[in-house]
Image (spheres, rainbow, N blue to C red):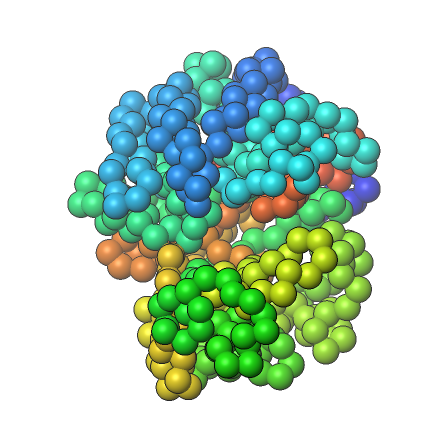
Amino acid sequence: MPDQDLDRRTLMASAAAAGAGLMLPASAGAAGAKADIAAIRKAAEAGKAETVARLQEWIRHPGIAAEKWRVDESCEFTMGLLRDAGFQMVRKMPTDGSPGIFATLDAGARRSVGVYFMYDVKQVVPSEWAHPPFEAAIIDKPGFGTVVTGRGAVNQKGPETAFLAALHAFKASGRKLPVNLVLVAEGEEEIASPHFHQVVQAPEVVAALKRCEGIFIPSASQSENGSVEIELGAKGPMEFQLISSGEHSGRGPKGDIHSSLHAMVDSPVWRLVQALNTLVEADGHTPAIDGWFENVRPLTAREKALILEASTKQSEADMKKAFGVKAWINDEPWPVALQRLASQPTVNIQGLVAGYMGPGGKTVLPGRAEAKLECRLVPNQTFKEAEAKLRAHLSKRGFSDIEVNVSGGYDPTETAEDSRIIRAEKAVYARSGADVAISPRSAGSWPGSVFTQPPVSLPAGQFGLGYGTGAHAPNEFYVIDSSNPKILGLVDSAMGFVDLLYELATIS
């Protein structure tokens, strides 16, 4: 593996052009295959301006599922992107929520590969952004280079655009894809995919996916030091809202009243606080919901070994800096904190709202309080189990008056380390020169379980070179031209997807 300080962008470009093999799959040593790679790269470079414009326009079609804002418009725009990239069949899939997309590209190949897209994005508070979040501004970002900034830039439209750029480069160079593609997309990932199963489990979609070697979501997986992490799974989410109100419970006012009346009128706000306090232990982070750990599978010896190895390749200081934290829970050392990150289920308060928060005091007793929460689930917990245990826990403690609205969620996902999709990722990352760490699972979530579980039962993963950050935060960005020699720009990221498709076509 090349030294980490070498310019990987130069390595990858010269390897593709000169046929040195760094960006060629192991089976593609013939002169013809090298010529194909060189031609595809030339097309990717020639189409770069169009690729950037495509990404900018996609960011300008946001699709915010949580607000039901411009979702259909974003779906239609995404379908157009897929047609332009060469998918012969692109179909809108109605659900009980936002529509999904089912698309196929038949290259006449021996093998097929699944691809997962999301076209929705998180909400924004425009005043928190240095540039308008849907303007898709191209800016120079010190330490990173030329980037596009906007909501969805890295989560997930930048990496997905890089994948589409790879398909455009195949088409422009006159080269056939080495695999057939089956793509499914949704517009509700950011609200925990409550209806995506209706897309994936449609009979025609199941039939198409079952012909695939595996499925992946395009990502920007490099860290600032150029390393990448392969995740063998992801935690599952459960998003829900707890509401305490006098109108619903009959205990407390229907609306805000004078605070002096608290001497004889119940407070819905304190009621909610008391209910929330039962969900975690006194340490503030260990879930205390009855039976929560009943089915939690501890880390295996192999998973612990993977985490220990990953701790030597990832920068603790960089992660603390990126997240603005000074210490981990219990001041735990880096390897232990990473074990906790992979293995522990969580109950987190996303937001807590009640009463008056303007200047001065208002002397009111609020009639309503609400909290938005999410749980992260680990193997072998399930979404249905978690919801049932949450409701039973609150009811047992006398909090049946608290409204529980579960809005979305799904099970954790796991994929075998020796599956073709994971081995192909490892091979491509190794050829790119990136230092690779393998993690048992992501602390975040994506709906991989709809693929890894019956009726589809496919290995699933995340793949992608390149860099971006700010997902769910202000000033999200994705790198177009990198000034950091350890991370790749848009064209090289697209070539990473080219390499992955060749690898999946030939890996034994």
Is residue 297 in sight in this rendering? no
Query: Where 481 sits versus 346, above or below?
Result: above
* Residue 25 at x, y percent in the picture: 53, 37
Q: Foreground residue, 363 or 62?
A: 363
Residue found 69% across the figure and 47% down from its top = 223
Residue 455 falls left or right of residue 34: left
Q: Would you identify the image quadrant in which residue 348 lies?
A: bottom right
Residue 165 falls left or right of residue 141: left
* Residue 438 at x, y percent in the picture: 59, 59
Residue found 46% across the figure and 62% down from its top = 255
* Residue 407 at x, y percent in the picture: 38, 57
Residue found 56% across the figure and 23% down from its top = 56
Residue found 48% across the figure and 72% down from its top = 268
Residue 386 falls left or right of residue 263: left
Total marks placed: 0
Q: Foreground residue, 314 or 137?
A: 137
Residue found at the far left of this picture: 203
Q: Foreground residue, 7 or 68?
A: 68
* Residue 70 at x, y percent in the picture: 41, 31
Query: Where 276 sits versus 106, above or below?
Result: below
Residue 226 falls left or right of residue 265: right
Is residue 450 in sight in this rendering? yes
